[in-house]
Amino acid sequence: MIRLKVTFVFLLLIPLCLPVKLFAQVEPAAPGMASGFPVPGYVILSNGDTLFGKIRWALKYVENNPVEVKFIAENGESRFFNASEIKGFGNRQKVWEEGIRSPIYLAPEDYVSLPSFKKGIPVFMNRLIGGRLTVYQNRSSGIITTTKSEQNTRIDGIAFFFTPGEGLSIGPSYRTDYRIIESRTRFTSYFVSREGGAIIKVDKENFDDLYSTLFGDCPAIGQEADKNPDLKKFKNFMILAEVYNQVCR
């Protein structure tokens, strides 16, 4: 009888362990994954002070965005923070790859306290790109499974180049890893704020209409698009946004 119980518990544990290994083996992990256990991170208080410790999502959502996180200080003290109380938080998750004993840390993620798109309730939105054009993840948007196959050619710009296997390089000093680019270009829509203005939703259906509003004030972007017409396609929106923020400051 004891043997049966042990075997049963062991079998239950196997499915819980498998996703972690598979998660590390698949192509880049999608951003905005819930942190159900404490991970390294920070919170930015309403007065601008930053506290470092560990972060765990409270798994409370409004419009699919987290609204509360648990912060654990280095001394072990913990407290819950709501999106209406602080300016934002960040976390850095880790995964384990089969055959490697040390964890692999994913790229840090920053979340900003903002009114939700529909109801205007304070939520935490994942900031994918910051700058004159700030792009936030729409966690409710679907994932484009064909993005990787569509982005299989190098883009040679005037001030940048993009290679699927290497990443995005802008000028002599700015570079984004290809895994980050791929993980951020798998969504069907994004929330975008231009120079701190109102948030708009950008998707494949309205991208052509919004192109001039988003990028039309920068002649350098026009030159880049003339050389690489594919830049004006929605599938390359995240690449274009990064180029815009670096070239059109």
Image (cartoon, rainbow, N blue to C red):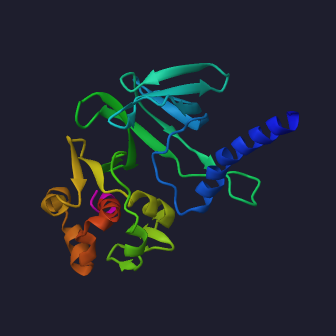
Quadrant where the N terminus is found in the figure: top right
Expressed as whole percent of the image width and height from the top left, the position of residue 144 reads 37, 62
Quadrant where the C terminus is found in the figure: bottom left
Q: Residue at x 50, y 40 (%)?
A: 34
Q: Residue at x 23, y 74 (%)?
A: 225
Residue 77 picture quarter: top right
Viewer-side residue, 191 vs 226? 191
Residue 101, above or below 75 = below
- Say left or right for 150 vs 12: left
Viewer-side residue, 164 vs 168? 164
Residue 102, above or below 68 = below
Q: Residue at x 31, y 59 (%)?
A: 241
- Predominant SS along the magenta part: helix
Q: Residue at x 28, y 34 (%)?
A: 116
Residue farthest toward the front in the current orientation of the protein: 1
Question: What span is in magenta?
Answer: 245-249
- Let me know if residue 222 appears in the view: yes
Task: Please say whether residue 74 is one of the residues in the magenta stretch.
Answer: no
- Say left or right for 155 vs 81: left
Residue 18, above or below 233 = above
Residue 122, above or below 170 = above
Expressed as whole percent of the image width and height from the top left, the position of residue 124 reads 38, 34
Task: Please say whether residue 246 is one of the residues in the magenta stretch.
Answer: yes
Expressed as whole percent of the image width and height from the top left, the position of residue 240 reads 30, 64
How many numbered discs, if any?
0
- Let me know if residue 151 appears in the view: no
Expressed as whole percent of the image width and height from the top left, the position of residue 244 reads 29, 61
